[in-house]
Image (cartoon, coloured by chain):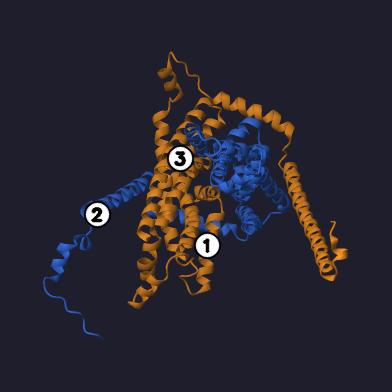
Chain colours: A blue, B orange
Amino acid sequence: MPPAPSIAPGEIARLEKLQPTLFRRPWPELFLTYGLWTAFFGVLIFGLWWINASPARIWEGLGKLGFLVQFMFPPSDGGHFWEFAYAILETVGMAFLGTLIAAIVALPLGFLGAKNVIPNWFFHFGLRRFFDGFRAVDSLIWALIFVAAVGMGPFAGVLAIVFSDIPVFAKLFSESIENIDNKPVEGVRASGARELHTLRLGVFPQVVPVMLSHVLYFFESNVRSATILGIVGAGGIGLALSDRIRINNWDEAAFIIIMILVTVAVIDNISKRIRMKIILDKTDSK
Amino acid sequence: MTSPSTTLGAGARDARDRLSRFEARFLAERRTRMAWTALYLALFLAATIGSMVVSGFNVQKLMTGLPKAWNYVHGTLPTLTLENLLGDLRTWYWGFNYWLRLLVETVLMAFVGTALGGFLALLLCFPASRNLVQRSGIYFSARRALEFFRTVPELVFALIFVFAFGLGPFAGVLAIAVHTAGSLGKLFAEVNENVDMRPLEGVYASGGNWPMAMRLAVMPQALPNYASYALLRFEINVRGAAVLGVVGAGGIGQDLYFAIRQFEYQDISAILLLLIVTVSIIDMVCETIRHRLIGADNFKGH
């Protein structure tokens, strides 16, 4: 081992005077860090107190949860397999149709919200905030509203998905329109094309793959959310699931949960493949 | 094509052959491509028609349903007059203090749920990172656990937890925490898989063990991204917490559910507006912090 380098006495003190921030963090920074952590834990403890969390409660609940899990095994369909399978199909159908309609309706809204289509700051900002505001309303709330307005059943579920997706799609679409490369557009325009041709040949080839992959991604996520819309009566597998849980039929509930997991995994896989293909085609053509 | 090849001999004939071969191949390629497009289109149409059949969706229903929905939304709007604006607002927001309390509860539920779930995600994300674990068994089980946590819908966890832990926000917080652990754990693991591996070697070389390497080599690199994802999840969880009340798991959703069920039209719009304002404020604050975090990250990195 090489000998340890010797440090002259006073050297460290000298360095500390020269570069104090290397030895101690400046106190405003320390203050900020500790302040933030204190605030974080303060709110956390307040929240835990608010919801009445206690180790005893967790322990007791975990015991009950253990019982439930025991009741869940073995999962069984109770002879309702085809009924459940149809409900799953309904769920996927709701998600598919809802995503499709939302995408179609959001397309013109996306163009309206793009900065480079309508270069009016006030309009742009207002529309974006409007979309953002509506995003706060979850699809389950829309489902509650539509069940009250048009009655129970999958039709209300489709409308709920449509309305909760339109603002998000509009926002994503206008962002992808804003991100296009202007050179192809100028090229098409320079060869004497009119507005519609410019859109079709300059803008669409750039934005359609991006939009399609967003739409597919939302289809995946909508299959997930469509599985619970049934809890409020808006069609799909959720009704069967919440009923089984309410009447303490845990083995069938577990069976339905497994069916949901399998369906979601299959849909994710298919959609991921299509998305990859779209993205690859896009990079090929570039 | 009017090519003068007949007078030009073998070389030109060869070129023409090649050209015609190319054209034939081009046509064939184009035909297969069109066939694929037609197939995709047919599949798409079949899926559309199929989903219209299973979901009982048709244009006539839409034509009668949308006006009904519009009437409903219109019915929820309050009657505000200019002469008595304050009084009208007071009638509209008769339960303001009560709703505010529930909103605070909703945001707190999201906060505690995100914090607990984030902590769990932090524990699970290291074994779920391909580059950080040697044994594939640990990696595999950590990944599957995270997948399970995030694929089971939050509301289903809430339904089950309401049974086990009783009605109220406690069950809701646990549901949020479990779901958050699943989704954040996956995102954290992806961040971990992109860290620079040299600091790890440094920690191991100076005698550190695996937890030390995670804490001292991986976390400092990944922390800004963790925080940014956690904030994003917090925004999502506020929205999620707002509906957990539907199954009795606390928050503003419970009151919204009652208002919709009992056709208290004006309460619906009052609560929804409060919710939209709250979520928008939280989104804006979180977005600002996230941009600063990622900005700071870039600054440190280069």
Query: Which residue in the rendered view is the most extreme toward the left?
Result: A10
Question: Quadrant of the image for the C terminus of chain B?
Answer: bottom left
Give, as a three-letter code, the residue at label 3.
Answer: Gly
Q: Which residue is mark 3?
A: B251
Front disc: 2 or 3: 2
Kind of element beneath mark 2: helix
Q: Above or below — where is B53 with respect to B202?
A: above
| Separation of marks 2 and 1 at Cα, in angstroms | 38 Å
Residue at x 62% of width, y 61% of height: A74
Q: Nearer the viewer, residue A158 or A28?
A: A28
* Residue situated in front as seen by the camera: B19 or B185: B19
Q: Earlier in the sequence, mark 1 or mark 3?
A: 1
Query: Which amino acid type is shown beneath numbered disc 2?
Result: Leu
Residue A194 falls left or right of residue B182: right
**Chain name for mark 2:** A
**For residue B86, which quarter of the picture?**
top left
Check chain identity for marks 2 and 1: say if they share one: no
Q: Which residue is mark 2?
A: A30
Left or right of B9? Residue B201 is left
Q: Nearer the viewer, mark 2 or mark 1?
A: 2
